[in-house]
Image (cartoon, grey):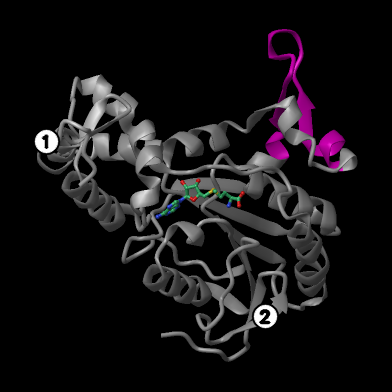
Amino acid sequence: MKTTAAGEPVVVDDFVVTDHEFSRFTAFVHRQTGIALNETKRPLVCSRLSKRLRHYGYVRLRQYYDHLTERDPTGEELAHMVNALTTNKTEFFREAHHFALLRTEILERCATANGPRRLRVWSAGCSSGEEAYSIAFTVLDGLEDAADWDVRILASDIDTNVLALATRGVYAANRVAGVPAALRERYLLRGRGPSEGLVRVRPEVTRLVTFRRINLRDEAWPIRAAFDAIFCRNVLIYFDHALQRRVVRRLAEHLKPGGHLFLGHSESLLGMGPGLRSLGKTVYAKVRGGEHR
Ligand SMILES: C[S@@+](CC[C@H](N)C(=O)[O-])C[C@H]1O[C@@H](n2cnc3c(N)ncnc32)[C@H](O)[C@@H]1O
């Protein structure tokens, strides 16, 4: 255990954390969310939690742990804890080549298929919604006769704060710089007067997207759909290897044959994805007839 010169436990961000308290707490976070936090994350974890501990007047991590495990029957504080600990960095058209591929491969495949004019996409770990709306802009712009198509985009996250922002669909104007100008004009409304400096996603876009809280760590996901594409980008990096494998296998189960899985730039499926074939640049296609168990 790290101690001060006087042999006292370490005080981080004005509360006390021993090695034992920290490892017991991170094991709890891992069980609840799948997020793997090692010793190097201790300062980050403590600074993100300090507001929650101050809220209750707690001076030790142990007190907060006891609260979460013994005095939180509704899970209200658990949600606050999860919201405080997640990393939500995102942006519109992040890794723009994925949206280029969505447009060419998927939309072309759909447009030439004889089946029902239906497209289903999932943004798993959607943060504040930029990824889901980037998908929606791409689909609306890329599909000929988009109005004749049944398009639905599911966007999910474990963090209820970012989901509230996403559902609102209002962003600071400087956050939409990555949206190509033509799409910005077509699908975003510029705020005036008191809303100056803000943009709002147009209703014809928001109505395609359903935001839901889904914890990818959970054994069962409340989803029946099979998707043409799943974006699960920059989420798996927070999980350990065993959970990454499990989540990838289950995401693949939710893909239609030939459907695409998009991962973040530092997330590779090396040795993880039987039934998935690499298309390069962290994009994978479900092999037709490829079964996952
Ligand atoms: C860094 S953001 C990535 C956002 C977006 N996909 C992108 O690439 O820009 C990671 C998101 O994963 C979410 N997340 C972390 N653990 C999760 C879990 N167990 N289930 C669902 N979402 C989770 C976080 O709340 C966060 O919003």
- Mark number for residue 25? none
Front position in the image: 44 or 34: 44
Q: Quadrant of residue 201?
A: top right
Front position in the image: 116 or 281: 281
Q: Position of residue 98 (x, y in %)?
A: 74, 61
**Residue 278 showing in the rendered view:** yes
Query: In the rendered image, which residue does mark 2 sit on?
Result: 278
Q: Are marks 2 and 1 in contact (CB under 8 Å)?
A: no
Badge 2: few (under 14), some or many (20 or more) residues near its Cα, within 10 Å?
some
**Residue 208 showing in the rendered view:** no
Q: Residue farthest to the right?
A: 182
Q: CA distance from mark 2 to mark 1?
A: 47 Å
The relative height of residue 25 versus residue 237 in the rendered view (above or below) is above
Secondary structure of the residue carrying tag 1 is loop
Secondary structure of the residue carrying tag 2 is strand
Q: Residue at x 73, y 55 (%)?
A: 95
Q: Residue at x 46, y 77 (%)?
A: 249
* The magenta segment: 183-204
Q: Residue at x 75, y 28 (%)?
A: 174
Query: In the rendered image, which residue does mark 1 sit on?
Result: 71
Residue 34 placement, left or right of 5: right
Q: Amino acid at mark 2?
A: Ser
The relative height of residue 16 versus residue 145 in the rendered view (above or below) is above
Q: Position of residue 45 (x, y in %)?
A: 36, 40
Badge 1: few (under 14), some or many (20 or more) residues near its Cα, within 10 Å?
few
Q: Considering only order in the chain, which callout, 1 or 2, is on the residue closer to the N terminus?
A: 1
Q: Quadrant of residue 226?
A: bottom right
